[in-house]
Amino acid sequence: MDSIVNNYRQYHNTWDEMFTEEGSIRELYTEFGSYLESVPVENLNKMQEFSKQFFMNQGVTFTVYNNKKGVERIFPFDIIPRIIKEKEWKIIQSGIKQRIKALNFFLKDIYHEQFIIKDGLIPANLIASHPNYIREMRNVNVPKNIYTHISGVDLIRDKDGEFYVLEDNLRTPSGVSYMLENREITRRLYPKLMPKKKVLPIDNYPQLLYDQLKTLVSIDNPEIVLLTPGLYNSAYYEHSTLARLMGVELVEGSDLVLKNHNVFMKTAGGLKKVDVIYRRIDDDYLDPLSFNTDSVLGLAGIMEAYRQGNVVIVNAPGTGVADDKAVYTYIPAIIRYYLNEEPILKNIKTFQLSNTDEKNYVIENIDQMVVKKTDGSGGYGMLMGKSASKREIKDYIRKIDLKPENFIAQPTLSLSTSPCIINNELTPRCVDLRPFAVFGANGISVCPGGLSRVALKKGSLVVNSSQGGGSKDTWVIKDD
Amino acid sequence: MLSRVANNLFWMDRYMERSYGLLNLIKTNYNSTLDSGDYSSWNNIQKTYMGIYKSKPNDEYLDTISIINTMLFDSENPNTMSNIVIRARENARSVQEHISRELWLSVNKYYLHISNENLSINFRNSDPIEFVNEMLQFNHIYYSVADITQERGNAYCFMNLGKYLERVVQSIEFLSLRIINLNDKDQKLSESFFWKNLLISIGGYQLYVKTYKSIFNVENIIEMIAINENFPRSIRYSIIKLYTHIERLNNYNKLNDRQLLFHVGKLKNSLQYSTIGSIKKIGLQKFLDEIKHDLNNISLHINKIYFSQSY
């Protein structure tokens, strides 16, 4: 029979989430596969259109300014969910917990005694010269010894079918509101399929987050606020959604004032003390007295209030030193050092270009490499050896030679693919997975599933929303 | 509640009320030109509501259509319908945690409707009254959704402050622009459609006819718009509402500031003891100027107490 399922053409040499190499449907997708075989593609198109309208009406959008005229855009969403077995999820979950726990120990150590450097596991200059290592945080005792309250760990599945960690995001990672909205819409798209598949729920994430934030202070009813850069930030939708769902105040820097090293917000009824600040602005903009002096997004003097223990900042300033691409290589060692455990989730083989042997190897095999700047993010400033022109490569190598310690290289990965509805066809697109973890005094909890980001361009490996990426709902289904 | 949020809630409703007034004005003025053929009436409206001072001859039906089109969609002019709704929605977007989900959806849908590029193209091929009525539906939905879904707390009070302050301003404008200069000897005063259109534009035709039957004169209109207690667009009605919400805000926020309440209360009472006779005695212009002066004072106090505190 000619159906969109039969016409599915897999990428070569790539793991597909729904189909085996031979082209048959994997067991966990059985019901979904027969659903797709039975439903006309026009209906799927309608569902796609419906979800677009749903996001528009709800205002799940960001504004793009063209010729002074604001245009509302939605982040592209694909209706076919990505499914993961609970058994596999449990491994991911414990792997993430292990990583976050170790990274938190690592942060505490490098901002205090620095045993890991003294024991020679990590070169001192890596930390000392690190742009995200914040000297103001030296010897600051952070509440409950937690630095990485909220994190998103980016995972990919390589062709061998195993999950690898691509990146740890410890600096206010975004995307969790899309995870929630994607679930909201898929619930309605598959009213019969979803309950049958026993998908683990995620909608308690805001409560989970609130409960964890509450544990950071020993006050009965702490005033928790979410600090946003404002309405024109592309993630504003997320900020306002989280504030709304947690029932906390969404504040801007200008709403806050400092009095006797305590943080207050200006309300219609006068000043009100703030106890916990979940900030969605970068370290650099947090306090013009300590960091970027031009910033008006934060609050002057907030770092001193923090050091005195009068307010909790979430995540703690200075976590950026633990999630960048240069430290990434050392994470397996970090896990062994602090936890005396073997890493559950694997790292991708990474070459440090500051090491001459490794640099030479990378340049010789540049067509199989992805080269990245250690302080880059969002998919910018990287070189894909496979697709770059000779000239681009030459220019890039010149940049590397200038400052090799700013670069790392990884062998070109094949991200696994998941089927998407594009142009009336079921067609594979590369996906990654960003589960979200929350760390409070009650320990670490990971929300089952997370955000599956999709590279919507054919053959592309770049899933970042700023570069044509979209997303999917992620179902973790209960084992029978 | 944050001062910034309070201020944005205030402006959200103020813009919604303004858009409502503007639409009604457009609709009825268009309607009256169908009776009178007097297209020059647009010049005044454009001056007051759009800040457009170049008066044009406007002697054609087609001029009217393009004037309405400008008033609805001109993106360069900050006072057009589309820009007012964009700002109402922007304010709503910044206070989503404080308004009901349904209210946000209703503002957002209005915004999506009015910023759809096909809309202004369709306008040229539609009946303007029908077209404006469709837009008015969004305002009606907004009011009723606010009524049945919005919790009665700080947010609701600030929204109402914005709404009624804007409404008073509109009613004062109405009296000072369209009534004060009416000359008893004017030919058009003998045309019943003139009175009808005038009253419809402020939404008071039905009540007027019920109260004064079909006796049309300037005094009755002033009485109804200035001091009628039951007409929801009268100055007095709006001031009573302002008083109610300011009193509630004082209680919610445990403020000791009695000055604001004093000013509104004073205005409320002076309106309560005004009659058409007393208004005529001091003159309508002076009567309106005094109210404007009081409103100015009230606005300043609202600003000082709730929106822009300095510590």
Image (cartoon, coloured by chain):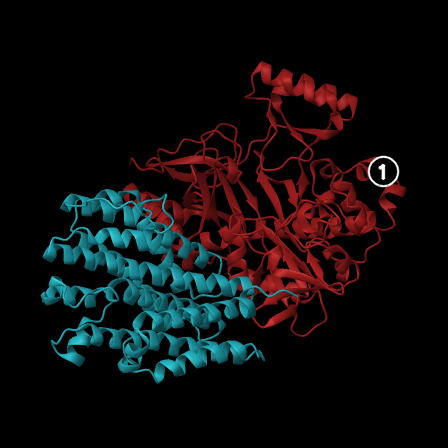
Chain colours: A red, B cyan
Q: Position of residue A286 (x, y in %)?
A: 68, 51
Q: Name the residue tied to disc 1.
A: A124
Residue A317 visible? The answer is: yes
**Residue drawn 62% across the image and 55% down it:** A253
- Residue A29 vs residue A267: left or right? left
Mark 1 nearby-residue class (10 Å; few <14, some 14–19, many ≥20): some
Q: Nearer the viewer, residue A476 or B66?
A: B66
Residue A204 visible? The answer is: no
- Residue B198 vs residue A48: left or right? left
The number of numbered discs placed on residues in the rendered structure image is 1
Q: Amino acid at mark 1?
A: Ala
Q: Position of residue B204 (x, y in %)?
A: 22, 71
- Residue A284 vs residue B234: left or right? right
Question: Quarter of the image holding residue A3?
Answer: top left
Question: Quarter of the image holding residue B175?
Answer: bottom left
**Residue drawn 77% across the image and 49% down it:** A107
Question: Quarter of the image holding residue A149?
Answer: bottom right
**Residue drawn 10% across the image and 57% down it:** B35
Q: Nearer the viewer, residue A270 or A319?
A: A270
Name the subunit of mark 1: A
Q: Position of residue A325 (x, y in %)?
A: 69, 36
In the picture, the quarter occupied by the C terminus of chain B is bottom right
- Residue A161 vs residue B123: left or right? right
**Residue drawn 49% across the image and 55% down it:** A180
Tag 1 secondary structure? helix
- The residue sitting at the right extreme is A118
In the picture, the quarter occupied by the N terminus of chain B is bottom right
Query: Where B196 falls versus B59 (above or below)?
Result: below
Q: Nearer the viewer, residue A234 or A151?
A: A234
